[in-house]
Image: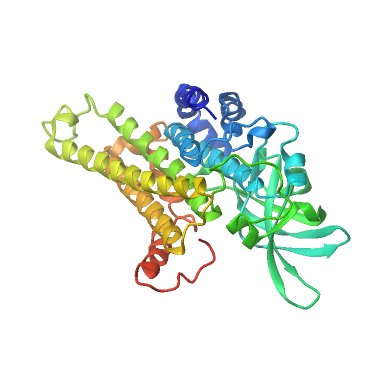
Amino acid sequence: MTDIEVGSVLEAVRDIVPTLRENGQRAEENRWIPDENIDLMDKAGVFRTAMPRRFGGLDFSVEDQCRVLSEIGRGCGSTAWLAMVWVSSVGLATLYPDKAQEEIFGSGPVRISGGFTPSGTLTPAGGGYVLDGTWRFNSGCRAADWNIAAAICERPDGSHEELIAILPMSEFTVADDWNTSSASATGSSTTTAKGVFVPEYRVIGYGDAIFNTTPGRDAEVTPGRRYRLFSYIMAVCAAAYLGVARGAYELFLERVPGRGITYTNWNDQAQHPLTQIQVATAANKLAAAEGLQGQILTLLQERAEADAEPTDAEKADVRGKAAFAIQLAKEAVEILYNAGGASVIQRSVPLQRFHRDAQGLALHGMLLLSTNLEVQGRVLLGLDPETPFL
């Protein structure tokens, strides 16, 4: 990775932000982003950002991946969420054995969907497993090449183990059941696999994924790229979300000049002290959120470069800070939306879509403020975090 490569991707992504915004309403109506959005991100290099350099990828640091995702968020919340899923799942695929990576990345950049809810079963079979199950909220599945599926495996001794399989998206059926008021264009449909064989080298344990200890990985890894799974996921989720909030802020500033305040003598909302206070409050909440995100990224990169495992306290801190950054950004968007006047509810006004996306994405189970602050607070008080998702 070079500064030139990072700058080139960032510039290309900034150039497509206006198109992503223009496509927003159509994407929402279709419940899926236009192919144009995907093609533009592909040409900009987005899908190569987390891909190992030995396969032709750009191998960006987590900070630079987050910068790219935030830029996309300025254009479209659904597109940013999908980009986050596809990019971060490529990062997860690098946790698989070399043989699996060669299959996955051998033909060039790929998009990978999936999730961590173990709502399937893996039954041991000769040389691998048979996968059965159904997975809801599978963001990005409609344009994914590969899909990650968490499942429970029952061993001969009766014990159970959580495993994560990766297999071609073509092995799944996709239901047409995504119809929501937020993140509408993510196409986060339900996917199902029935009796699909998965070779052993494309199945890893939850523990190996969390601690980056999968056996069978002998190929050289770029120094500073062994991030811890859930800390990495929290960071990239926050990046996409903060980008959406930044986009809402920009849209509000574009909308205000010359707008009057109905039933008052104010013919320019920007001149009203309340609007000035609202904009300043939103700007400071965004700056504070981005500051917390910066602390997270610094910690993750320092630990990765030292090839060191972050402590439980540090990982709990990442969860708490990421969720709190998202809360601050959500509050900023709410302020701006409420200051937008009655006409802001029109579908043709992008700010209302950014507001709904911000509301909905903040409800994601991994991002909930209460859950993450509980984990962080327990560790701050010297208690066990009582969760494996660190």
Residue 54, picture quadrant: top right
Q: 74 and 156: which one is in front?
A: 156
Q: Position of residue 188 (x, y in %)?
A: 59, 47
Which residue reaches farthest front? 306
**Image quadrant of residue 219?**
top right
The number of callouts visible is 0
Percent coordinates x, y for residue 161 in the rendering: 69, 68
Q: Is residue 301 depicted above or below 74 in this figure?
A: below
Left or right of 316? Residue 264 is left
Q: Residue at x 49, y 45 (%)?
A: 236
**282 with respect to 57 (left or right):** left
Q: Quadrant of residue 352?
A: top left
Nearest the camera: 121 or 299? 299
Looking at this rendering, what residue extends furthest in the right direction?
126
Question: Where's the N terminus, which quadrant?
Answer: top right
Q: Position of residue 65 (x, y in %)?
A: 50, 37
* Left or right: 123, with 212 as reference point: right
Which colour scheme appears in the figure? Answer: rainbow
Residue 299, compared with residue 64, is above or below; it is below
Say above or below: 114 vs 244: below
Q: Residue at x 23, y 25 (%)?
A: 257
- Spot occupied by residue 330 in the image (x, y as percentages of width and height): 35, 48
The residue shown at (55%, 38%) is 83
Q: Is residue 271 visible?
A: yes
Q: Is residue 187 visible?
A: no
